[in-house]
Image (spheres, coloured by chain):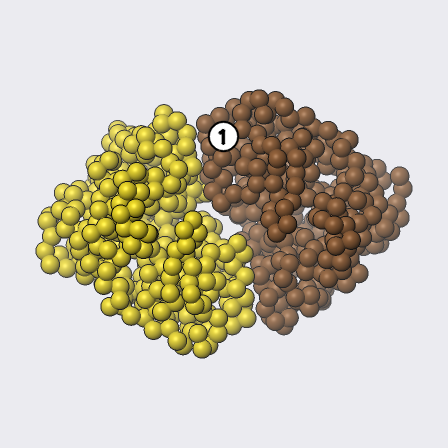
Chain colours: A brown, B yellow
Amino acid sequence: MSFAPLQNDTFLRAALRQPTSHTPIWLMRQAGRYLPEYKATRAKAGSFMGLATHPDFATEVTLQPLERFPLDAAILFSDILTVPDAMGLGLSFGEGEGPRFARTVHDEASLESLHFDLESLRYVFDAVTSIRKALNGRVPLIGFAGSPWTLACYMVEGKGSDDYRAVKTLLYRRPDLMQRLLDLLADAVAAYLNAQIDAGAQALMLFDSWGGVLAHDAYQRFALPASRRVLAQLKKTGADGQRVPHILFTKGGGLWLGDMLDSGADMLGLDWTLDLGRARAQVGDRVALQGNLDPMLLFAPPEVVAAEARKLLDSFGRPQRADGGWGGHVFNLGHGISQHTPIESVAALVEAVHAHSRALR
Amino acid sequence: MSFAPLQNDTFLRAALRQPTSHTPIWLMRQAGRYLPEYKATRAKAGSFMGLATHPDFATEVTLQPLERFPLDAAILFSDILTVPDAMGLGLSFGEGEGPRFARTVHDEASLESLHFDLESLRYVFDAVTSIRKALNGRVPLIGFAGSPWTLACYMVEGKGSDDYRAVKTLLYRRPDLMQRLLDLLADAVAAYLNAQIDAGAQALMLFDSWGGVLAHDAYQRFALPASRRVLAQLKKTGADGQRVPHILFTKGGGLWLGDMLDSGADMLGLDWTLDLGRARAQVGDRVALQGNLDPMLLFAPPEVVAAEARKLLDSFGRPQRADGGWGGHVFNLGHGISQHTPIESVAALVEAVHAHSRALR
């Protein structure tokens, strides 16, 4: 496969801590329900999975936010739960509910019945290639997957949870089974992400959305090593020889930022509870940082949104000289954008990040 | 009022960083649904609020866990939402649901209509006195309240929330109104807690259950100063001249432990995401620490529970010499005990904490 040359590589450069002319910005869940055009396409597709499993629809919604805002990256439209679905657990999304699995993992037998069918995820790889072509070199395309621990949560609980009782009970009662499940998942996720690179993904992000619910020791013993096992297996370059940055995002993992420095990720995603200046001081020049505006700040008036964005850029600090490496920053929210977000706030945010980060240089 | 002399002051001493013969333990929500005798009393009372508003029932359930386990403190049976209820918002608990308010705070008018009627909380103070008498000096009685920020969350949202959109929208759009609400709440909470001291409470705990959902800047600007405003107004001694330790617990606040050092609290409560050894190193001898076992660990077999409790005590480190101050530790869970917890796990936990902490000395 060959694709059009990349015109805006700001995101890739920042993620690899190379100098850039401005701070790049994209938003988690930027192709989503806050956009009327997304809702229209979803209505055509019939359901969330109808969107995700049809490359044409997935391409259409992935590009929608780029038509409205000068974002510096696109992210594959998909779900973190595709991997357990491809292991035979039967994923569904009830209307107005979260995801649900028909079967769960709860003992040796249910663990042993898991067989990962990478080929059944062909629709994802087709979507990656289709989006990459449609982007035509405009901005890079980010592929992604759920982290082993986060996938394990859903696979054991069968759905979202308030207290993670089932998955933590398994972890505390049968650490051996939990380890086997995480190992299995790590290898499947790595194969899945590498196949996304082969299909055209130019960066990869691992979402450890539930890492933050673990006790300190359990995070260190289970979730972090499992993410490390994924990251260690990922290809570092695409077919075109370009470096493919790897991103690890752990919601609620701020206390473990120092522990994540040797995760193997090029960039760490931060939720909104961290002070970006403190975080930068802590990580030094070892990794780039992505984040971390509170998504709820987008409910403030546009001028407040812009002012807070400038404050966040200021707290990261001025970029250093263009001839030296510097702690790269990719602007993002600290979590996915809310479906209720006013569109004018997003416009104000993107404009403020671009303008102020240029002024800082 | 005069009460029987205290026989076990281990909890009070540890909270004030004085030497103790063992590490004291109590459990958040220790009077609760995991106990069959609690469920029986609740059935008699008809509802949760029926329990909380009748001093005889509140006394009965408060003492129940002490009959089963040699816990080192009792905590008033009540709810954090009594204060907004006493401001006229109309608290109710639907069956199988969380709390709900009939009215919310959402603008100037609804804020101005709040009037705190301390006297309407007489049932709480009566319960405190009744429990203190029934304890007969066995262990100290902890009084408590919700923090201003946590109460504001419920008062603006009207109920629990996934994303805190309403309260954060108010905070980001109308920081002036949020500040007025927090000031009003801080003064009401302080009056409420001081009245609990007058009624016989021997320690006070402020629950900032939702502090951890805030962005870094918003926590520093709103939630922490509001808790500080409460703590600054609290009486430091009871009617008997005994020091009344003040505890601040912020779920999800681990990143801000250093910022809480000057909150005015004698002891800081930790959730399970912190490493206790790291936390102790960070706070030095400035405050005592309370916590922080993952409540879900109680679903492990009793021997695992005991081993993890010993590990946690070891990570805090050995107490220093008895003639010097040392960073006190009160053992607790990192959050309330689950209603599904096996009782034998609790017994194993309390026994292990007492035995191992004695052995460490």
Residue bearing mark 1 = A170
Residue A14 spot, x, y in % from top left: 71, 51
Give the number of callouts: 1
Compared to A230, does B77 lie above or below? below
A341 left or right of B223 in image:
right
Going by the numbered disc 1, the residue's amino acid type is Leu
A145 left or right of B49 in image:
right
Q: Quadrant of residue A277?
A: bottom right
Residue B59 spot, x, y in % from top left: 21, 49
Say if residue A286 shows up in the picture. no
A53 left or right of B219 in image:
right
**Circle 1: is it few (<14), some (14-19), or many (20+) Cα within 10 Å?**
some
Decide which of B42, B150 is in the foreground and name it: B42
Decide which of A342, A147 is in the foreground and name it: A342
Screen quadrant of the C terminus of chain B: top left
Q: Name the residue: 30% across, 46% down.
A: B43
Q: Quadrant of residue B126?
A: bottom left
Q: Name the residue: 71% across, 49% down.
A: A47
Decide which of B326, A99 is in the foreground and name it: A99
Q: Name the residue: 69% across, 28% down.
A: A116
Residue B342 spot, x, y in % from top left: 36, 33
Chain name for mark 1: A
Q: Secondary structure at mark 1?
A: helix
Compared to B139, does B237 lie above or below? below
Compared to B176, does B341 lie above or below? above
Screen quadrant of the N terminus of chain B: bottom left
Q: Name the residue: 49% across, 39% down.
A: A164
Say if residue A109 shows up in the picture. yes
